Image: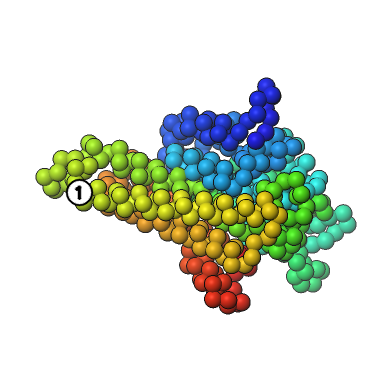
Amino acid sequence: MTTVENDRTETIEDVLTRIAELAPLIRKNAAASESDRRVSEETIAALKEAGAFRVVAPRRFGGLEAGLRSLLDVSSAVAEADGGAAWVVMLSNTNVWTTSLHPGRGLDEAFADGPDTIVSGVLAPSGKVRKVPGGYRVDGRWPYASASLHADWTTNGALLVDDNDQVLDQVAVAIPRADFRVEDTWYVAGMRASGSNTIVVEDVFVPEHRVASLGPYLAGEHICAHPDAPLYRGALTSFLNTAVTGPQLGLGRAALDLVRTKAAEKALAYTTVTRQADSVAFQMLVAEAAMKIETAHLHAYRAADDVQAHADAGVFPELIARARIRGDVAITLRSINEALNILLDAHGAASFAEVNAMQRIWRDSNVAARHAVTLPHVSMETYGKALLGIPEHITPLI
């Protein structure tokens, strides 16, 4: 929670109330946001005013510092109206969180204009960093940079190299909007509004305090730097993986609500059933989809609670605990996708009409579920190896 100007303590419930009030506006703009391949400025401004971008920002800058469970609540609430807008909210908040792990001057700069800073970013080391007096020179191209079109800052992975181009370390680099450009490359089947374009940085100087070695954060060595802020003691990969499930939960709820609402007025095609709701077969499909959506929520929130419990205790989770969180995320993504396919069967071919939000929900969910950091088959292999005590893993992001 944080304190607002009238001395009233603002909570995450206040933010959720405002998002609920905004839902008609966000829903109204959703189709245009997809067509324009960027979330509408009206929606972004409204979400900023609602506090959606300050969920995990530090309290000392006016943020809520509210936690991972709250981020799932907020991003899923936005996704009930628009998946693309929810993805921007979620990705910005996760990048705000990673920025906040590194205390110092960089935070003062990032939040100089308040807690509603929008931060894009890509973890993959798609750039190069070279040491120079007082800092570093940075070059790189980072595709799939969600929220790029609205970002005030970007925080990207890069390789620290010497004069012979030999790799010395993997680092994270924070860069303000004035020092990067966005290349229009995001032409996709779903999540079109997320603005996940390519960020380009060309021979930009970055001071030392905006560059951090990534290895210590992956190993949990940042925990001791936040004795009074448990939120920022969370395991890096576990936090990021779990956060990605938020929009999916909202997309699942939106699809279920749409199918249930239409069931009272829509006939079961080429049958004698005049209302889908009266069909036993339809009832069973809806029930099965609803339970898969409930399953997704149970796994996502269990993962969020596990991340926070370790953070509260100031303990970096054991490998098997981190791997199980990846397993929770995999089940969440698969359950939502399976539920959507069942709901498409129930709702019928009308689901794919351009005027029907179902087709956009389905496309947004399926594209988002293939995010490289959370591929379900990689996560399940990771958990299986951990359960069997196999030390060789195919990803360091556990």
Residue 230 lies, with reference to residue 30, above or below; the image says below
Mark 1 secondary-structure assignment? helix
Residue 315 is drawn in which quadrant?
bottom right
State the residue in front, 294 or 126.
Answer: 294
Q: Name the spot of residue 245 as percent of width and height, x first.
A: 51, 52
In the shown orientation, is residue 289 left or right of residue 150?
Answer: left
- The residue that appears at 67% across and 22% down in the rendered structure is 6
Q: Name the spot of residue 361 as percent of width and height, x first.
A: 40, 47
* Type of amino acid under label 1: Val
- The residue that appears at 60% across and 58% down in the rendered structure is 238
- The residue that appears at 66% across and 41% down in the rendered structure is 65
Q: Name the spot of residue 204 as percent of width and height, x first.
A: 76, 53
Q: Quadrant of the N terminus?
A: top right
Residue 220 is drawn in which quadrant?
bottom right
Label 1: how many residues lie within 10 Å, few (<14), some (14-19) or many (20+)? few
Residue 97 lies, with reference to residue 23, above or below; the image says below
State the residue in front, 33 or 168.
Answer: 168
Q: Residue furthest left?
A: 272
